[in-house]
Image: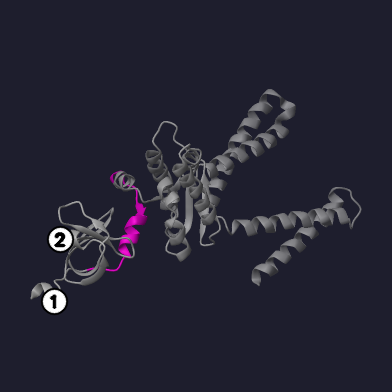
Amino acid sequence: MTVVIVRVLVLAVAVGAGLALGPVLAVPTPSPWLAGAGLLVGILAVLLEWRARRVPVERLFWGATGAAIGVVLGLGLGSAVGAVVPGAATLGRGLFGLLVGYLGWSVALAKGDELAGLSTKLFPKAASQTRPYKILDTSVIIDGRVADVCESGFLEGTLVVPQFVLRELQQIADSPDGLKRNRGKRGFGVIQRLQRIPKVTVLIHDGDFPQVREVDRKLIELAKAMDAKVVTNDYNLNKVAEVSGVAVLNVNELANAVKPAVLPGEMMHLYVLKEGKEAGQGVAYLDDGTMVVVDHGRKLIGQSVDVTVTSVLQTTAGRMIFARPVPSAESLQ
């Protein structure tokens, strides 16, 4: 309520200031035109104040710093022009101050990502409250599970989709291979789905690294520049990013982490689906897709049997369970 009252007072003062300019401009008072002009200026000031509340403090700081440096340089350049053309001194300083000030402001904001490290040191409290960027790679977009994770609320904030990832998706969608074409179209559908989720913001980033050819390396370089995390389900990209010092959110690791724990000695009832790689093995699957290798299960293919878990192998690529059939009462006799 206090803010509303202050804004109304600002508008009233702006209207009064507009009317007070009447004698200075030799305009009969009260003048509705001057009052309207003052009101417009007041509305502009309130709108700027309202918009500034939603801008991070580091962007305000760098924008103001760039504008101030630009104004100083512009005034100096205008003075130099005035020394050559004396009649243009005042106009030159004002014009160059405005133009170079705008240039400094826009450049400072455009380079905000590169100044992120310095911003963290200058504004540590604001940096701790800022949700880090999360860059999506091509594989995790096509996979689609990232949308389910976002809808559940486990992943939020700003999701970055680089233009070079969109280009790779476009190439896949234009492939003569029908399977690849469907995968590319699915990827664009996932991006549209993410854009409709209120808990996340999808940012299409124009940044590129022309000197780097591989998309995975571009992702890592962009993550370093933005101090961001990479969201992927690509095992190789996961390892390269970790070696490069980039934080990774692997959807496969998340899926493995939320699977029910299985301990050696537990019993399961499974349907043996096919033959395993080793002699005599059978293969079954849990409801979540986890593969279970059944020792001596080849002869049980096509049957539902009780098994006992002997060991569990956990890797980044997934989880594998090893089991053996529970001896039946007949075999024990």
72, 302: nearer the viewer: 302
Q: Which residues are magenta?
A: 243-262
Image quarter of the C terminus: bottom left
Tell me the SS state at disc 1. Answer: helix
> Dot 1 corresponds to which residue?
329
* Furthest residue toward top: 84
Query: Which residue does the image show at 65% across and 68% down from the upper left?
Result: 3
**Residue 82 sits in quarter:** top right
Label 2 crowd bin: few (<14), some (14–19), many (20+), radius 10 Å: some
Mark 1 or mark 2: name the one nearer the start of the chain.
2
Mark 2 highlights which residue?
296
| Magenta-drawn stretch contains 219 | no
Most foreground residue, 120 or 85: 120
Position of residue 258 relative to residue 280, above or below, is below
Residue 263 versus residue 242 in the image, above or below:
below
Amino acid type, label 2: His
Q: Position of residue 125 (x, y in %)?
A: 43, 60
> Which x, y percent locates residue 16?
80, 60
Mark 1 surroundings: few (<14), some (14-19) or many (≥20) residues within 10 A: few
Residue 218 appears left or right of 200 = left
104 vs 257, left or right, is right
Amino acid bearing label 1: Ala
Q: Residue at x 89, y 50 (%)?
A: 27
Left or right? Give the position of 23 relative to 194.
right
Say which element carries label 2.
Answer: loop
